[in-house]
Image: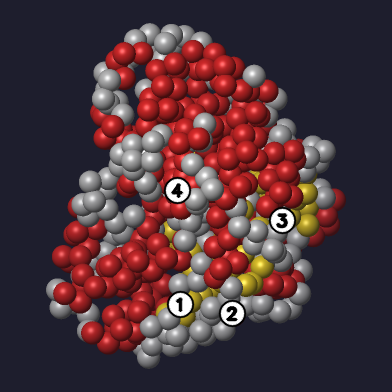
Protein backbone atom coordinates (compact mmCIF):
# COMPACT_ATOMS: atom_id res chain seq x y z
CA UNK A 1 0.00 0.00 0.00
CA UNK A 2 1.38 3.36 -1.03
CA UNK A 3 0.52 6.65 0.66
CA UNK A 4 -0.65 8.74 -2.29
CA UNK A 5 -3.81 9.46 -4.24
CA UNK A 6 -3.50 6.36 -6.39
CA UNK A 7 -2.56 4.17 -3.45
CA UNK A 8 -5.54 5.01 -1.28
CA UNK A 9 -7.96 3.98 -4.02
CA UNK A 10 -7.52 0.41 -2.73
CA UNK A 11 -9.85 1.11 0.18
CA UNK A 12 -10.26 -2.53 1.20
CA UNK A 13 -6.53 -2.97 1.91
CA UNK A 14 -6.33 0.19 4.03
CA UNK A 15 -9.47 -0.67 5.97
CA UNK A 16 -8.16 -4.18 6.57
CA UNK A 17 -5.03 -2.61 8.08
CA UNK A 18 -7.20 -0.53 10.41
CA UNK A 19 -6.21 2.77 8.79
CA UNK A 20 -8.98 5.31 8.32
CA UNK A 21 -9.15 6.96 4.88
CA UNK A 22 -10.50 10.43 4.05
CA UNK A 23 -14.18 10.52 3.06
CA UNK A 24 -13.61 13.29 0.50
CA UNK A 25 -11.83 13.21 -2.83
CA UNK A 26 -8.30 14.60 -2.69
CA UNK A 27 -8.24 15.69 -6.34
CA UNK A 28 -11.48 17.63 -6.01
CA UNK A 29 -10.16 19.27 -2.83
CA UNK A 30 -6.89 20.20 -4.55
CA UNK A 31 -8.72 21.67 -7.55
CA UNK A 32 -10.96 23.78 -5.30
CA UNK A 33 -7.90 24.99 -3.39
CA UNK A 34 -6.22 25.99 -6.64
CA UNK A 35 -9.24 27.97 -7.80
CA UNK A 36 -10.37 29.43 -4.47
CA UNK A 37 -7.58 29.25 -1.88
CA UNK A 38 -8.70 30.06 1.66
CA UNK A 39 -5.79 28.98 3.85
CA UNK A 40 -2.00 29.13 3.49
CA UNK A 41 0.22 27.73 6.24
CA UNK A 42 3.95 28.36 6.78
CA UNK A 43 5.89 25.62 8.56
CA UNK A 44 5.42 22.19 7.00
CA UNK A 45 6.58 20.08 9.95
CA UNK A 46 4.94 17.64 12.33
CA UNK A 47 2.77 19.93 14.46
CA UNK A 48 1.15 21.21 11.25
CA UNK A 49 0.75 17.81 9.63
CA UNK A 50 -0.39 16.09 12.83
CA UNK A 51 -2.71 18.77 14.22
CA UNK A 52 -3.50 21.82 12.07
CA UNK A 53 -4.07 19.81 8.87
CA UNK A 54 -6.30 17.42 10.80
CA UNK A 55 -8.60 20.33 11.70
CA UNK A 56 -9.23 21.06 8.03
CA UNK A 57 -9.72 17.36 7.39
CA UNK A 58 -12.52 17.31 9.96
CA UNK A 59 -14.19 20.27 8.24
CA UNK A 60 -13.85 18.62 4.83
CA UNK A 61 -15.37 15.41 6.16
CA UNK A 62 -18.33 17.34 7.57
CA UNK A 63 -18.85 19.10 4.24
CA UNK A 64 -18.26 22.48 5.89
CA UNK A 65 -15.45 23.44 3.51
CA UNK A 66 -14.45 22.31 0.02
CA UNK A 67 -10.82 23.36 -0.19
CA UNK A 68 -7.71 22.38 1.72
CA UNK A 69 -4.53 24.05 2.94
CA UNK A 70 -1.54 25.20 0.92
CA UNK A 71 1.58 24.37 2.97
CA UNK A 72 4.79 26.34 2.55
CA UNK A 73 8.20 26.07 4.14
CA UNK A 74 10.68 28.92 4.27
CA UNK A 75 13.49 27.00 5.95
CA UNK A 76 13.73 23.32 5.05
CA UNK A 77 12.85 22.62 1.44
CA UNK A 78 13.88 18.99 1.95
CA UNK A 79 10.58 18.44 3.77
CA UNK A 80 8.66 19.38 0.62
CA UNK A 81 10.99 17.39 -1.66
CA UNK A 82 10.96 14.19 0.37
CA UNK A 83 7.86 14.16 2.57
CA UNK A 84 5.26 16.11 0.58
CA UNK A 85 5.84 15.61 -3.15
CA UNK A 86 6.27 11.78 -3.20
CA UNK A 87 3.09 11.29 -1.14
CA UNK A 88 0.74 13.83 -2.75
CA UNK A 89 1.13 15.92 0.42
CA UNK A 90 -0.64 13.24 2.46
CA UNK A 91 0.36 12.25 6.00
CA UNK A 92 -0.23 9.05 7.90
CA UNK A 93 -1.30 10.27 11.34
CA UNK A 94 -0.72 7.86 14.23
CA UNK A 95 -2.17 8.76 17.64
CA UNK A 96 -0.34 6.95 20.46
CA UNK A 97 -2.81 6.08 23.19
CA UNK A 98 -1.79 5.45 26.83
CA UNK A 99 -2.82 1.77 26.60
CA UNK A 100 -0.24 1.23 23.85
CA UNK A 101 -2.70 1.07 20.99
CA UNK A 102 -2.44 3.19 17.87
CA UNK A 103 -5.17 5.08 16.04
CA UNK A 104 -4.16 5.47 12.38
CA UNK A 105 -5.56 7.80 9.73
CA UNK A 106 -4.56 9.19 6.34
CA UNK A 107 -4.67 13.00 6.44
CA UNK A 108 -5.30 14.37 2.96
CA UNK A 109 -6.35 17.98 3.58
CA UNK A 110 -3.10 19.52 2.29
CA UNK A 111 -3.52 20.49 -1.35
CA UNK A 112 0.19 20.99 -2.01
CA UNK A 113 3.51 21.81 -0.43
CA UNK A 114 5.56 24.74 -1.71
CA UNK A 115 9.14 25.93 -1.25
CA UNK A 116 8.92 29.56 -0.11
CA UNK A 117 12.18 30.97 -1.44
CA UNK A 118 13.48 32.91 -4.41
CA UNK A 119 15.41 29.86 -5.61
CA UNK A 120 12.03 28.33 -6.48
CA UNK A 121 10.26 30.90 -8.71
CA UNK A 122 7.46 28.50 -9.73
CA UNK A 123 6.58 27.79 -6.13
CA UNK A 124 6.79 31.47 -5.22
CA UNK A 125 4.48 32.38 -8.09
CA UNK A 126 1.90 29.92 -6.77
CA UNK A 127 2.17 31.50 -3.33
CA UNK A 128 1.84 34.98 -4.81
CA UNK A 129 -1.23 33.88 -6.74
CA UNK A 130 -2.81 32.55 -3.54
CA UNK A 131 -2.09 35.82 -1.74
CA UNK A 132 -3.57 37.83 -4.60
CA UNK A 133 -6.78 35.81 -4.43
CA UNK A 134 -9.67 37.58 -2.62
CA UNK A 135 -10.83 34.16 -1.37
CA UNK A 136 -7.76 33.77 0.89
CA UNK A 137 -8.95 34.20 4.46
CA UNK A 138 -6.02 33.25 6.64
CA UNK A 139 -2.28 32.65 6.73
CA UNK A 140 -1.04 30.63 9.69
CA UNK A 141 2.38 29.71 11.07
CA UNK A 142 4.17 26.96 12.98
CA UNK A 143 7.76 28.06 12.37
CA UNK A 144 8.96 27.98 16.04
CA UNK A 145 9.84 31.01 18.13
CA UNK A 146 13.12 31.67 16.36
CA UNK A 147 11.26 32.05 13.06
CA UNK A 148 10.03 35.48 14.18
CA UNK A 149 13.38 36.74 15.49
CA UNK A 150 15.03 39.56 13.57
CA UNK A 151 17.82 40.35 16.06
CA UNK A 152 20.62 38.51 17.83
CA UNK A 153 21.40 38.50 21.56
CA UNK A 154 23.19 41.85 21.24
CA UNK A 155 20.04 43.43 19.84
CA UNK A 156 21.53 43.74 16.35
CA UNK A 157 19.68 42.70 13.22
CA UNK A 158 20.91 39.41 11.79
CA UNK A 159 22.97 40.02 8.62
CA UNK A 160 20.46 38.15 6.45
CA UNK A 161 17.63 40.27 7.88
CA UNK A 162 19.56 43.48 7.20
CA UNK A 163 20.13 42.21 3.67
CA UNK A 164 16.35 41.82 3.28
CA UNK A 165 15.88 45.41 4.43
CA UNK A 166 18.49 46.61 1.93
CA UNK A 167 17.36 44.48 -1.01
CA UNK A 168 13.61 45.05 -0.72
CA UNK A 169 10.58 42.83 -1.37
CA UNK A 170 11.88 41.09 -4.49
CA UNK A 171 14.93 39.47 -2.84
CA UNK A 172 13.88 38.04 0.54
CA UNK A 173 15.28 35.18 2.56
CA UNK A 174 13.86 35.51 6.09
CA UNK A 175 10.34 34.18 6.78
CA UNK A 176 9.07 37.52 8.02
CA UNK A 177 10.36 39.34 4.94
CA UNK A 178 8.78 36.76 2.65
CA UNK A 179 5.44 37.20 4.40
CA UNK A 180 5.71 40.98 4.13
CA UNK A 181 6.45 40.66 0.40
CA UNK A 182 3.44 38.38 -0.08
CA UNK A 183 1.22 40.84 1.77
CA UNK A 184 2.46 43.47 -0.67
CA UNK A 185 1.22 41.24 -3.50
CA UNK A 186 -2.20 41.19 -1.84
CA UNK A 187 -2.22 44.93 -1.29
CA UNK A 188 -1.34 45.58 -4.93
CA UNK A 189 -4.10 43.18 -6.03
CA UNK A 190 -6.78 45.19 -4.25
CA UNK A 191 -6.03 44.73 -0.57
CA UNK A 192 -8.76 42.28 0.41
CA UNK A 193 -8.56 41.83 4.21
CA UNK A 194 -6.76 38.82 5.68
CA UNK A 195 -5.91 37.24 9.04
CA UNK A 196 -2.25 36.45 9.74
CA UNK A 197 -2.26 33.89 12.54
CA UNK A 198 0.69 32.56 14.53
CA UNK A 199 -0.04 29.10 15.89
CA UNK A 200 3.40 28.77 17.42
CA UNK A 201 4.02 27.71 20.96
CA UNK A 202 5.14 31.07 22.35
CA UNK A 203 3.74 33.88 24.44
CA UNK A 204 1.86 36.67 22.66
CA UNK A 205 2.60 34.95 19.36
CA UNK A 206 0.36 37.28 17.35
CA UNK A 207 2.13 40.29 18.80
CA UNK A 208 5.55 38.83 17.91
CA UNK A 209 4.44 38.08 14.37
CA UNK A 210 2.92 41.53 13.87
CA UNK A 211 5.98 43.28 15.32
CA UNK A 212 8.37 41.45 13.02
CA UNK A 213 6.29 41.93 9.88
CA UNK A 214 5.76 45.62 10.62
CA UNK A 215 9.47 46.11 11.23
CA UNK A 216 10.22 44.76 7.76
CA UNK A 217 7.49 46.88 6.20
CA UNK A 218 8.68 50.05 7.95
CA UNK A 219 12.30 49.44 6.88
CA UNK A 220 11.16 49.04 3.29
CA UNK A 221 9.08 52.21 3.60
CA UNK A 222 12.13 54.14 4.84
CA UNK A 223 14.13 52.92 1.86
CA UNK A 224 11.39 53.70 -0.64
CA UNK A 225 10.59 50.12 -1.62
CA UNK A 226 6.90 50.30 -0.64
CA UNK A 227 4.27 53.06 -0.54
CA UNK A 228 2.89 54.61 2.63
CA UNK A 229 -0.51 53.17 1.79
CA UNK A 230 0.85 49.64 2.09
CA UNK A 231 2.32 50.30 5.54
CA UNK A 232 -0.98 51.85 6.65
CA UNK A 233 -2.88 48.83 5.30
CA UNK A 234 -0.73 46.33 7.23
CA UNK A 235 -1.12 48.40 10.41
CA UNK A 236 -4.92 48.53 10.07
CA UNK A 237 -6.26 45.46 11.92
CA UNK A 238 -9.56 45.74 10.06
CA UNK A 239 -7.51 44.95 6.95
CA UNK A 240 -4.69 42.74 8.27
CA UNK A 241 -5.36 41.16 11.65
CA UNK A 242 -2.82 39.30 13.77
CA UNK A 243 -4.89 37.10 16.10
CA UNK A 244 -3.23 35.51 19.12
CA UNK A 245 -3.45 31.79 19.78
CA UNK A 246 -2.46 29.01 22.16
CA UNK A 247 -1.54 25.59 20.81
CA UNK A 248 -0.76 22.38 22.65
CA UNK A 249 0.00 18.93 21.30
CA UNK A 250 3.14 16.84 21.76
CA UNK A 251 4.43 15.67 18.37
CA UNK A 252 7.76 13.93 18.95
CA UNK A 253 10.20 12.60 16.39
CA UNK A 254 9.06 9.57 14.35
CA UNK A 255 9.35 6.39 16.41
CA UNK A 256 10.83 3.14 15.14
CA UNK A 257 8.01 1.13 16.72
CA UNK A 258 5.47 3.12 14.69
CA UNK A 259 7.45 2.69 11.47
CA UNK A 260 7.59 -1.08 12.11
CA UNK A 261 3.86 -1.25 12.87
CA UNK A 262 3.01 0.55 9.63
CA UNK A 263 5.37 -1.72 7.71
CA UNK A 264 3.64 -4.75 9.23
CA UNK A 265 0.32 -3.28 8.08
CA UNK A 266 1.66 -3.27 4.53
CA UNK A 267 2.27 0.46 4.13
CA UNK A 268 5.34 1.09 1.97
CA UNK A 269 8.11 3.71 2.17
CA UNK A 270 7.53 4.84 5.75
CA UNK A 271 11.20 5.15 6.75
CA UNK A 272 12.17 8.50 8.31
CA UNK A 273 14.73 10.74 6.65
CA UNK A 274 17.13 13.41 7.85
CA UNK A 275 17.06 16.48 5.60
CA UNK A 276 20.05 18.62 4.72
CA UNK A 277 18.79 21.05 7.38
CA UNK A 278 18.96 18.20 9.91
CA UNK A 279 15.21 17.75 10.26
CA UNK A 280 14.33 14.20 11.33
CA UNK A 281 10.97 13.53 9.71
CA UNK A 282 8.90 10.73 8.24
CA UNK A 283 5.87 10.28 5.97
CA UNK A 284 3.97 9.55 9.16
CA UNK A 285 3.45 11.67 12.28
CA UNK A 286 3.19 10.03 15.70
CA UNK A 287 1.71 12.09 18.49
CA UNK A 288 -0.31 12.06 21.66
CA UNK A 289 -4.10 12.25 21.39
CA UNK A 290 -4.75 15.29 23.66
CA UNK A 291 -4.64 18.59 21.79
CA UNK A 292 -5.73 22.17 22.37
CA UNK A 293 -5.97 25.18 20.09
CA UNK A 294 -7.40 28.48 21.32
CA UNK A 295 -7.64 31.29 18.77
CA UNK A 296 -8.62 34.94 19.01
CA UNK A 297 -11.63 35.32 16.73
CA UNK A 298 -10.55 38.27 14.54
CA UNK A 299 -10.78 37.28 10.87
CA UNK A 300 -11.66 40.30 8.71
CA UNK A 301 -12.24 38.22 5.56
CA UNK A 302 -14.12 35.36 7.24
CA UNK A 303 -12.69 32.02 8.28
CA UNK A 304 -13.29 28.27 8.24
CA UNK A 305 -15.70 27.13 11.00
CA UNK A 306 -12.82 25.94 13.14
CA UNK A 307 -14.98 25.59 16.24
CA UNK A 308 -16.64 22.64 14.45
CA UNK A 309 -13.24 20.92 14.52
CA UNK A 310 -12.70 21.47 18.26
CA UNK A 311 -10.91 24.82 18.23
CA UNK A 312 -11.76 27.29 20.98
CA UNK A 313 -12.63 30.56 19.21
CA UNK A 314 -12.62 33.37 21.74
CA UNK A 315 -11.33 36.83 22.69
CA UNK A 316 -7.74 38.00 23.17
CA UNK A 317 -7.82 38.06 26.97
CA UNK A 318 -8.98 34.45 27.10
CA UNK A 319 -6.30 33.39 24.62
CA UNK A 320 -3.68 35.25 26.63
CA UNK A 321 -4.76 33.70 29.92
CA UNK A 322 -4.92 30.21 28.41
CA UNK A 323 -1.54 30.61 26.76
CA UNK A 324 0.05 31.94 29.95
CA UNK A 325 -1.44 29.05 31.87
CA UNK A 326 0.12 26.53 29.52
CA UNK A 327 3.37 28.18 28.38
CA UNK A 328 4.45 29.79 31.64
CA UNK A 329 3.12 27.32 34.22
CA UNK A 330 1.28 24.13 33.42
CA UNK A 331 3.31 22.45 30.67
CA UNK A 332 6.21 24.21 28.94
CA UNK A 333 8.27 25.07 32.05
CA UNK A 334 7.94 21.48 33.20
CA UNK A 335 9.02 20.21 29.79
CA UNK A 336 12.14 22.41 29.78
CA UNK A 337 13.14 21.33 33.29
CA UNK A 338 12.77 17.68 32.28
CA UNK A 339 14.73 18.34 29.10
CA UNK A 340 17.90 19.80 30.58
CA UNK A 341 18.02 17.50 33.59
CA UNK A 342 17.12 14.48 31.47
CA UNK A 343 20.10 15.15 29.20
CA UNK A 344 22.41 15.59 32.20
CA UNK A 345 21.21 12.38 33.83
CA UNK A 346 21.39 10.23 30.71
CA UNK A 347 17.71 9.84 29.90
CA UNK A 348 16.49 9.52 26.33
CA UNK A 349 12.78 9.46 27.12
CA UNK A 350 10.50 11.98 28.82
CA UNK A 351 8.24 9.14 29.97
CA UNK A 352 11.21 7.40 31.63
CA UNK A 353 12.03 10.62 33.48
CA UNK A 354 8.53 10.55 34.95
CA UNK A 355 9.60 7.49 36.96
CA UNK A 356 12.40 9.53 38.57
CA UNK A 357 11.13 10.74 41.93
CA UNK A 358 13.38 13.80 42.09
CA UNK A 359 12.46 14.97 38.58
CA UNK A 360 8.76 14.43 39.21
CA UNK A 361 9.09 16.36 42.48
CA UNK A 362 10.89 19.17 40.62
CA UNK A 363 8.17 19.69 38.03
CA UNK A 364 5.44 19.37 40.65
CA UNK A 365 7.12 22.12 42.68
CA UNK A 366 7.58 24.32 39.59
CA UNK A 367 3.97 23.81 38.56
CA UNK A 368 1.84 23.41 41.67
CA UNK A 369 3.93 25.34 44.20
CA UNK A 370 5.48 28.21 42.24
CA UNK A 371 3.41 28.47 39.06
CA UNK A 372 -0.25 27.96 39.94
CA UNK A 373 -0.33 30.92 42.41
CA UNK A 374 0.15 33.40 39.54
CA UNK A 375 -2.10 31.72 36.96
CA UNK A 376 -5.23 33.57 35.86
CA UNK A 377 -8.03 31.08 35.26
CA UNK A 378 -8.97 31.35 31.55
CA UNK A 379 -12.37 29.77 32.34
CA UNK A 380 -12.52 27.70 29.15
CA UNK A 381 -9.92 25.29 30.59
CA UNK A 382 -9.26 24.57 34.28
CA UNK A 383 -5.58 25.22 35.14
CA UNK A 384 -5.57 22.53 37.83
CA UNK A 385 -7.25 19.96 35.59
CA UNK A 386 -4.83 20.85 32.79
CA UNK A 387 -1.67 20.48 34.87
CA UNK A 388 -2.95 17.25 36.45
CA UNK A 389 -3.51 15.83 32.96
CA UNK A 390 0.04 16.89 31.98
CA UNK A 391 1.78 15.42 35.04
CA UNK A 392 -0.40 12.39 35.65
CA UNK A 393 -1.25 11.28 32.11
CA UNK A 394 0.52 13.04 29.26
CA UNK A 395 4.18 13.19 30.29
CA UNK A 396 4.22 9.64 31.75
CA UNK A 397 2.68 8.11 28.59
CA UNK A 398 5.32 5.44 27.76
CA UNK A 399 4.10 5.25 24.18
CA UNK A 400 5.01 8.85 23.38
CA UNK A 401 8.62 8.53 22.16
CA UNK A 402 9.61 12.04 23.14
CA UNK A 403 13.19 12.75 24.12
CA UNK A 404 14.68 15.42 26.40
CA UNK A 405 17.22 16.09 23.66
CA UNK A 406 14.41 17.26 21.34
CA UNK A 407 12.76 19.40 24.00
CA UNK A 408 16.14 20.99 24.87
CA UNK A 409 16.40 22.46 21.37
CA UNK A 410 16.43 26.29 21.30
CA UNK A 411 16.09 26.60 25.09
CA UNK A 412 17.59 30.09 25.01
CA UNK A 413 14.57 31.18 22.97
CA UNK A 414 12.17 29.70 25.51
CA UNK A 415 13.35 30.51 29.04
CA UNK A 416 12.12 34.11 28.90
CA UNK A 417 8.57 32.85 28.51
CA UNK A 418 8.75 29.60 30.43
CA UNK A 419 10.36 31.08 33.53
CA UNK A 420 10.76 34.82 33.07
CA UNK A 421 7.03 35.49 32.85
CA UNK A 422 6.32 33.77 36.17
CA UNK A 423 9.18 35.65 37.80
CA UNK A 424 7.76 38.92 36.44
CA UNK A 425 4.37 38.00 37.90
CA UNK A 426 5.98 37.54 41.30
CA UNK A 427 7.64 40.95 40.95
CA UNK A 428 4.33 42.61 40.09
CA UNK A 429 2.46 41.11 43.05
CA UNK A 430 2.72 42.74 46.48
CA UNK A 431 1.87 39.45 48.18
CA UNK A 432 4.65 37.47 46.47
CA UNK A 433 8.44 37.75 46.66
CA UNK A 434 10.50 36.51 43.69
CA UNK A 435 13.47 35.99 46.00
CA UNK A 436 11.49 33.19 47.68
CA UNK A 437 11.39 31.12 44.47
CA UNK A 438 13.49 27.96 44.67
CA UNK A 439 12.50 25.47 41.98
CA UNK A 440 12.39 27.80 38.97
CA UNK A 441 15.92 29.00 39.87
CA UNK A 442 16.90 25.33 40.20
CA UNK A 443 15.60 24.70 36.66
CA UNK A 444 17.56 27.71 35.35
CA UNK A 445 20.72 26.51 37.11
CA UNK A 446 20.15 23.11 35.52
CA UNK A 447 20.08 24.73 32.09
CA UNK A 448 23.38 26.54 32.77
CA UNK A 449 24.88 23.25 33.97
CA UNK A 450 23.61 21.61 30.77
CA UNK A 451 25.34 24.27 28.65
CA UNK A 452 28.71 23.07 29.96
CA UNK A 453 28.20 20.01 27.70
CA UNK A 454 29.31 17.55 30.37
CA UNK A 455 26.83 15.08 31.84
CA UNK A 456 26.50 14.16 35.50
CA UNK A 457 29.01 11.34 35.12
CA UNK A 458 31.59 13.81 33.84
CA UNK A 459 31.39 12.59 30.26
CA UNK A 460 31.18 14.92 27.22
CA UNK A 461 27.59 15.53 26.17
CA UNK A 462 26.26 17.01 22.94
CA UNK A 463 23.93 19.97 23.46
CA UNK A 464 20.90 20.33 21.23
CA UNK A 465 20.92 23.05 18.58
CA UNK A 466 20.29 26.57 19.81
CA UNK A 467 20.93 29.91 18.07
CA UNK A 468 22.70 31.21 21.19
CA UNK A 469 24.61 28.06 22.07
CA UNK A 470 28.04 29.27 20.96
CA UNK A 471 27.60 32.69 22.59
CA UNK A 472 26.45 31.24 25.91
CA UNK A 473 29.11 28.56 26.01
CA UNK A 474 31.76 31.20 25.35
CA UNK A 475 30.47 33.22 28.31
CA UNK A 476 30.53 30.10 30.50
CA UNK A 477 33.99 29.06 29.37
CA UNK A 478 36.22 28.53 32.37
CA UNK A 479 33.57 26.90 34.55
CA UNK A 480 34.96 23.46 35.29
CA UNK A 481 33.42 20.33 36.74
CA UNK A 482 35.08 19.69 40.10
CA UNK A 483 35.86 23.37 40.75
CA UNK A 484 32.87 25.27 42.19
CA UNK A 485 34.98 28.43 42.54
CA UNK A 486 35.41 28.51 38.76
CA UNK A 487 31.90 29.94 38.49
CA UNK A 488 33.25 33.35 39.49
CA UNK A 489 31.51 36.22 37.72
CA UNK A 490 30.74 34.21 34.60
CA UNK A 491 27.00 34.16 35.23
CA UNK A 492 26.41 37.89 35.60
CA UNK A 493 26.27 38.76 31.87
CA UNK A 494 23.78 35.94 31.32
CA UNK A 495 21.56 36.31 34.39
CA UNK A 496 21.35 40.08 34.04
CA UNK A 497 20.34 39.89 30.36
CA UNK A 498 16.60 40.58 29.89
CA UNK A 499 16.90 39.41 26.28
CA UNK A 500 17.33 35.90 27.68
CA UNK A 501 15.09 35.88 30.74
CA UNK A 502 12.70 38.80 30.03
CA UNK A 503 13.91 40.29 33.30
CA UNK A 504 17.22 41.05 35.04
CA UNK A 505 17.59 38.14 37.47
CA UNK A 506 20.30 39.96 39.42
CA UNK A 507 17.91 42.86 40.02
CA UNK A 508 15.14 40.64 41.41
CA UNK A 509 17.47 38.81 43.78
CA UNK A 510 17.69 35.39 42.12
CA UNK A 511 21.21 35.40 40.68
CA UNK A 512 22.96 34.41 43.93
CA UNK A 513 20.57 31.48 44.39
CA UNK A 514 21.11 30.27 40.82
CA UNK A 515 24.87 30.63 41.26
CA UNK A 516 24.69 28.64 44.50
CA UNK A 517 22.81 25.80 42.79
CA UNK A 518 25.27 25.74 39.88
CA UNK A 519 28.25 25.65 42.24
CA UNK A 520 26.73 22.63 43.94
CA UNK A 521 26.06 20.91 40.61
CA UNK A 522 29.66 21.23 39.40
CA UNK A 523 31.31 20.02 42.59
CA UNK A 524 32.07 16.70 40.88
CA UNK A 525 30.55 13.70 39.10
CA UNK A 526 27.14 12.86 40.53
CA UNK A 527 26.66 16.37 41.88
CA UNK A 528 23.60 17.08 39.72
CA UNK A 529 21.77 14.11 41.24
CA UNK A 530 22.99 15.02 44.71
CA UNK A 531 21.73 18.59 44.31
CA UNK A 532 18.31 17.40 43.21
CA UNK A 533 18.14 15.02 46.15
CA UNK A 534 19.16 17.77 48.55
CA UNK A 535 16.33 20.08 47.55
CA UNK A 536 13.64 17.61 46.51
CA UNK A 537 13.88 14.44 48.57
| Residue 6, percent from left and from top | 67, 61
Q: Nearer the viewer, residue 241 or 444?
A: 444
Q: Nearer the viewer, mark 3 or mark 2?
A: 3
Q: Is 310 above or below relative to 440?
A: below
Answer with the quarter of the image where residue 60 lies.
bottom right
380 horizontally vs 469: left or right: right
Q: What residue is rendered at 52% in x and 85% in y? A: 301
For the C terminus, the quadrant is top right
Q: Is 40 above or below relative to 201?
A: below
Q: Secondary structure at mark 1?
A: strand
Q: Nearer the viewer, mark 1 or mark 4?
A: 4
Sequence-wise first label, 4 or 3: 3
| Residue 68, percent from left and from top | 60, 72
Q: Would you name the residue on which mark 3 appears? A: 382
| Distance between mark 2 and mark 4 Cα atoms | 40 Å
Q: Label 4 neighbourhood size at 10 Å, few (<14), some (14-19), many (20+)?
A: some
Sequence-wise first label, 1 or 4: 1
Q: Would you name the residue on which mark 2 appears? A: 303
Q: Nearer the viewer, mark 4 or mark 3?
A: 4
Q: Is 515 above or below relative to 258?
A: above
Q: Nearer the viewer, residue 338 or 282?
A: 338
Sequence-wise first label, 3 or 1: 1
Q: Would you name the residue on which mark 4 appears? A: 427
Q: Secondary structure at mark 3?
A: loop
Amino acid sequence: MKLNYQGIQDKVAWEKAGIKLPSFDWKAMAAETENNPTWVHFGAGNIFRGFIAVLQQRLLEQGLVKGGIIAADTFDYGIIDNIYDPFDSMTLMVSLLPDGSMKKEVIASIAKGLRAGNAYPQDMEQLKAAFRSPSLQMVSFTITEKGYALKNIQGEYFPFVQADFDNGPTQCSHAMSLVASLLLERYNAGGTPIAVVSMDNCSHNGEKLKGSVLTVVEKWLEKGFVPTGFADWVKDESKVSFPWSMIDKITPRPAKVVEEALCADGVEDMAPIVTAKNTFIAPFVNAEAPQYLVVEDRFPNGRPPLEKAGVYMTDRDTVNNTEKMKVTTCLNPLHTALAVYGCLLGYDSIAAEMKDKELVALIEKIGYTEGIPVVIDPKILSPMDFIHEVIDQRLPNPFIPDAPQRIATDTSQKVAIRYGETIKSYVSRSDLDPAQLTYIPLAIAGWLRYLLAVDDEGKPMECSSDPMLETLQTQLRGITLGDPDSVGASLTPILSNPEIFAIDLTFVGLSSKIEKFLREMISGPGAVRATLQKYLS
